[in-house]
Image (cartoon, rainbow, N blue to C red):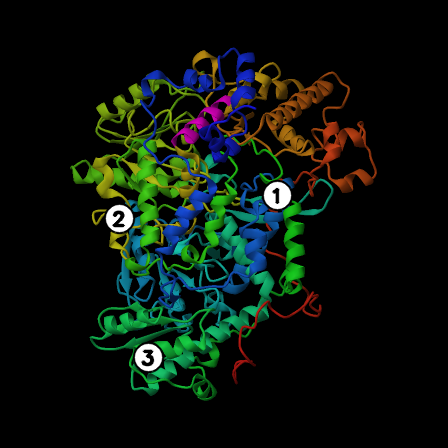
């Protein structure tokens, strides 16, 4: 019997061996067929020698899943979950278990990609349509988008939207009410400065300011808790030819008069308290809603309704789809995504509870605040705001810290609002004992909560309560039981294509499988229930995890300092550019305002540069896909004295390792510029090369691409920014957490100090599971897999760009243009046909129109790679049948793809069989994915934009599968007067 060593046997516990799909002897055999000694040698041949890393990464050795979870549990135990009553835009919320299990913990939802291909994305598109409808109904405005990153970002987007709307007609001044959230104000100031917008704070209870302004922002309810009817002040703002924006708590809008009814032009906010865990600040879905005339300026994504080839209504991304790649620096925003998974969670919270459930929850929150305030007032304490929804502000001269400390001893976090005031915010989880404990912290003897409850009446005037109905659409009436919602979510998931079904070969957007073990900690209470503004001694586990992750990312990238605050890749770009501009201003080079970038750059690069106040100048690419060195030198010369930054992607967006990258960086530095290296393709460098060591000054890193965080259907993402030492003082800061960033920073780029901290444990876990060797092997495998696909397809499609030895990096571009010229078959026809073969599409027409960019990642097995290659080869054979006249150019399986199950039973006027349409490969009989829509008419959708669910006629009875929410919201009947 063979004697195995313990080291050999223990190696079977390594996660990397289960994560990397093709390695070992099987991969070596494929490599030898390609002319290489081993699969690992392919990457070593592809990466230029002069940028390679010397020695292994200085990271902890790989842990087993059990070891990783034990370590992470130890960090979690160092956090102290409390009864969180701090408020300030963040509230404890209950995630219904049916939603947690079927969305948050379900790979069918969290491994999906942005729904650019609607025929295979109808489930998440419908869920996002529900989100838009929910926001529109609650705010009283007709158009909402499919979510933004957080409330502060949404406010900044509203500011810039309104500034564009009135450009040239008003002074560049944006007025913010004194009762707005402090983190929102700080983020507005960050975003306004590069654009020349002045942000001024004003107390609108004293009337309008004398100075001119183009728009004003109000908080409803205010940070202090105050609720007031804004109708008159909004009317006065309009009389000054300015616009009014309102930041509104959506839960309060279940019972309060909506801002749209007060005349608001834009309403923004966060849907966090619709079932989203606090997560130390995120991820949470921000929202924005506007008047109809502003819909084409709305930032981010909008889901709209169109029709498919069979005349059926189907959803699609409308108007703003990939706007940055089309308009670049002229884009309405650098936000190219949404917080889809969080938005879907929030929308299903509303679907599950329905309008009456939301009203009940809101009334319950308000009622607890009323009883709390009554107990304080009866004890002689001064409650500052007489009209409030959920937040009570109490004046205790000189005693604020004492009271807050006393409440903390009883397990409750309150908010200090200066030395004399304490803020207390009630939430969905507030209970009677919490009120008793709070009174005790103020030194009030125990009171009977029910006695007070019987005597208290709301302090809000009748005119501030909502009178209209909302969420009358069928979806918000039908799924109030766990059985009903479970089946609804399953139906939606079945319509979608995610990584749990098969390979998503998207170039530029690495779609690797997220470790299941890494997802487990996201819902642990000691991570999920931590308030972003909790005292630091309660969050030592989070802070240690953050510091470890920053050190690891610095080691991997070769930079000196890291900020985890940016909550998307685009925000990471923006933060890095702000750091450059702040640094240059500090050394007397603030006049530098030109950003060079290659024509192939990601569209968000240009949009982020514009948002940072830079002028974009494009550098040409040569025939091999590299930066045109002659044009680069010319642009460097013509921008002399004004050049701030050269912004590049490496490996290039064309999917090759450019040999001249060190020279490119040196030329930029010689011109006095900084080098921004977009980290979108870092998964081709980890363990092999470090941007901070081969010439770059700053990069952002997409945790949702390289380090295992799931894409979630288009978000949430995280985009940490990594910098060299001279830029470290200019990383993002935050007013509510001085230790979150340097005091010399430009301000926050996200509402929370550490951005979407609640999902940082995922990337931490991925790095612990992979270890330095596993990370390097993953990179080598990603490069090998891409070259394997290029090798297999090269005899059928031209590979557009290659580097040294004819190799690509981690992705390859195949050129469809010759086939299109010859046959009329386009890239769109091919990717729609791929759905019939059971595949998600590669990236279409980026960075080169008429091409497909394919990225297999390291997760995929040889069987899946071969299945994809076989599908592409079969499609090429189908194209040849069009070329030789076997099928007509306008009536063939590619032009008519995808084929739904229902289309097979309709009349069949096609010159190919039903079998050829739906089962082009015999293996599909064993497990067929059926698209639920035929090809959509995109032009129809843009001309006839419908971005909310149709309402039921007023005389239509609600169709329900049960009307009782999943838990009792109030312990008995609703209080008198609030039925």
Image coordinates for residue 675, horizontal then vertical, percent: 29, 30
Which numbered disc covers residue 310? none
Query: Residue most toward the front?
Result: 1
Q: Earlier in the sequence, mark 3 or mark 2?
A: 3
Dot 1 surroundings within 10 Å: few (below 14), some, or many (20 or more)?
many
User: According to the image, label 2 marks what residue?
Assistant: 741
Whether residue 798 is visible: no
Q: Name the residue under label 1.
A: 121
Q: Does the magenta stretch include residue 779?
A: yes
Of residues 7 and 482, the one drawn nearer to the viewer in this rendering: 7
Nearer to the camera, 230 or 815: 815
Residue 146 or residue 444, whichever sits in front: 444
- Specify start and end residues of the magenta stretch as a single range: 772-784
At label 3, counting other C-alpha atoms closer than 10 Å, the crowd grade (few under 14, some 14-19, many 20 or more) is some
Q: Distance between the residues labelled 3 and 1?
A: 53 Å
Dot 2 alpha-carbon crowd within 10 angstroms: few under 14, some 14 to 19, many 20 or more: many
Which labelled disc corresponds to residue 440? 3
State the image quarter where residue 309 is shown: top right
Q: Where is residue 216 in the image (x, y as percent from the top left)?
A: 35, 61
- Is 297 on the left or on the right of 56, as rendered? right
Q: In which quarter of the image is the N terminus?
A: top right
**Majority secondary structure in the magenta region:** helix
x and y, in percent, of residue 81 in the image: 39, 62
Q: Nearer the viewer, mark 3 or mark 1?
A: 3
- Please name the residue shown 66% across and 45% down the image: 495
Q: Which of marks 1 and 2 is in front?
A: 2
């Amino acid at each position: 019997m063979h004697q195995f060593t313990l080291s050999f046997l223990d190696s079977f516990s390594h996660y990397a061996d289960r994560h990397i799909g093709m390695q070992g002897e099987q991969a070596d055999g494929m490599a030898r067929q390609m002319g290489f000694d081993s699969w690992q040698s392919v990457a070593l041949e592809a990466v230029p020698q002069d940028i390679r890393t010397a020695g292994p990464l200085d990271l902890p050795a790989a842990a087993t899943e059990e070891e990783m979870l034990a370590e992470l549990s130890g960090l979690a135990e160092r956090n102290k979950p409390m009864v969180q009553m701090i408020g300030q835009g963040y509230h404890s919320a209950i995630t219904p278990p049916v939603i947690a299990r079927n969305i948050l913990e379900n790979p069918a939802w969290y491994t999906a990609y942005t729904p650019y291909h609607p025929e295979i994305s109808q489930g998440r598109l419908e869920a996002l349509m529900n989100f838009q409808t929910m926001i529109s109904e609650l705010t009283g405005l007709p158009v909402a988008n499919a979510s933004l990153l957080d409330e502060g970002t949404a406010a900044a987007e509203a500011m810039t939207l309104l500034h564009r709307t009135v450009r040239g007609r008003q002074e560049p001044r944006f007025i913010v009410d004194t009762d707005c959230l402090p983190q929102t104000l700080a983020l507005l100031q960050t975003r306004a400065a590069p654009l020349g917008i002045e942000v001024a704070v004003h107390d609108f209870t004293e009337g309008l300011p004398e100075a001119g302004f183009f728009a004003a922002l109000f908080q409803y309810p205010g940070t202090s808790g105050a609720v007031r009817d804004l109708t008159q002040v909004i009317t006065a703002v309009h009389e000054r030819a300015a616009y009014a924006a309102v930041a509104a708590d959506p839960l309060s809008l279940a019972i309060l008069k909506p801002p749209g009814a007060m005349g608001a032009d834009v309403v923004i906010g966060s849907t966090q308290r619709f079932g989203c865990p606090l997560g130390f600040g995120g991820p949470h879905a921000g929202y924005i809603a506007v008047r109809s005339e502003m819909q084409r300026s709305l930032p981010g994504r909008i889901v709209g309704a169109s029709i498919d080839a069979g005349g059926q209504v189907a959803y699609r991304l409308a108007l703003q789809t990939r706007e940055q790649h089309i308009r670049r620096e002229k884009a309405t925003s650098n936000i190219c995504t949404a917080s889809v998974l969080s938005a879907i969670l929030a929308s299903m919270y509303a679907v599950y509870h329905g309008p009456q459930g939301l009203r009940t929850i809101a009334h319950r929150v308000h009622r607890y605040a009323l009883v709390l305030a009554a107990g304080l007032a009866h004890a002689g304490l001064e409650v500052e705001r007489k009209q409030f929804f959920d937040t009570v502000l109490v004046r205790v001269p000189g005693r604020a810290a004492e009271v807050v400390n006393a409440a903390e001893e009883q397990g409750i976090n309150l908010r200090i609002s200066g030395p004399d005031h304490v803020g207390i915010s009630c939430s969905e989880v507030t209970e009677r004992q919490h009120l008793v404990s709070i009174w005790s912290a103020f030194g009030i003897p125990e009171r009977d909560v029910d006695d007070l409850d019987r005597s208290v009446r709301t302090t809000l005037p009748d005119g501030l309560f909502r009178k209209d109905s909302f969420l009358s659409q069928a979806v918000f009436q039908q799924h109030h039981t766990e059985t009903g919602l479970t089946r609804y979510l399953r139906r939606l998931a079945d319509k979608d294509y995610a990584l749990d079904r098969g390979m998503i070969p998207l170039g530029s957007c690495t779609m690797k499988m997220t470790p299941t073990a890494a997802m487990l900690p996201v819902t642990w209470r000691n991570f999920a229930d931590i308030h972003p503004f909790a005292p630091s001694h309660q969050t030592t586990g989070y802070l240690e995890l953050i510091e470890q992750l920053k050190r690891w990312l610095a080691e991997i990238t070769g930079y000196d300092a890291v900020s985890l605050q940016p909550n998307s890749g685009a925000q990471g770009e923006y933060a890095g550019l702000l750091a450059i501009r702040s640094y240059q201003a500090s050394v007397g080079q603030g006049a530098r305002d030109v950003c060079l970038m290659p024509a192939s750059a990601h569209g968000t690069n240009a949009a982020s540069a514009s948002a940072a106040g830079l002028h974009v100048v494009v550098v040409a690419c040569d025939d091999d896909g590299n930066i045109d060195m002659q044009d680069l030198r010319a642009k460097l010369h013509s921008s002399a004295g004004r050049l701030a930054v050269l912004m590049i992607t490496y490996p290039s967006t064309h999917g090759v390792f450019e040999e001249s990258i060190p020279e490119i960086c040196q030329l930029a530095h010689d011109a006095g510029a900084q080098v921004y290296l977009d980290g979108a393709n870092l998964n081709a460098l980890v363990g092999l090369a470090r941007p901070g060591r081969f010439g770059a000054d700053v990069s952002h890193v997409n945790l949702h691409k390289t380090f295992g965080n799931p894409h979630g259907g288009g978000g949430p993402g995280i985009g940490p920014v990594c910098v060299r030492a001279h830029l470290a003082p200019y990383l993002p800061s935050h007013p509510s957490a001085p230790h979150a960033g340097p005091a010399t920073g430009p301000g926050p780029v996200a509402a929370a100090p550490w951005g979407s901290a609640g999902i940082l444990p995922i990337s931490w876990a991925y790095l612990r599971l992979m270890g330095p060797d596993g990370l390097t092997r993953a990179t080598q495998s990603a490069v090998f897999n891409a070259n394997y696909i290029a090798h297999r397809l090269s005899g059928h499609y031209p590979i557009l760009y290659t580097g040294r030895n004819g190799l690509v990096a981690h992705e390859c571009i195949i050129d469809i243009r010759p086939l299109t010229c010859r046959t009329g078959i386009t890239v769109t026809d091919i990717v729609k046909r791929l759905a019939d073969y059971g595949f998600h599409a590669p990236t279409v027409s980026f960075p080169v129109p008429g091409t497909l960019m394919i990225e297999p990642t390291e997760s995929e097995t040889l069987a899946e790679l071969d299945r994809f290659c076989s599908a592409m080869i079969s499609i090429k054979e189908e194209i040849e049948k069009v070329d030789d006249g076997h099928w007509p150019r306008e009536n063939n399986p590619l032009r008519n793809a995808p084929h739904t199950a229902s289309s097979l039973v309709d009349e069949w006027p096609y010159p190919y069989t039903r079998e050829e349409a739906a089962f082009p490969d015999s293996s599909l009989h064993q497990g067929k994915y059926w698209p639920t829509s035929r090809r959509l008419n995109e032009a129809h959708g843009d001309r006839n934009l419908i971005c909310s669910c149709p309402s039921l006629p007023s005389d239509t009875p609600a169709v329900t599968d049960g009307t009782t929410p999943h838990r009792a919201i109030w312990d008995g009947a609703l209080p008198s007067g609030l039925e």
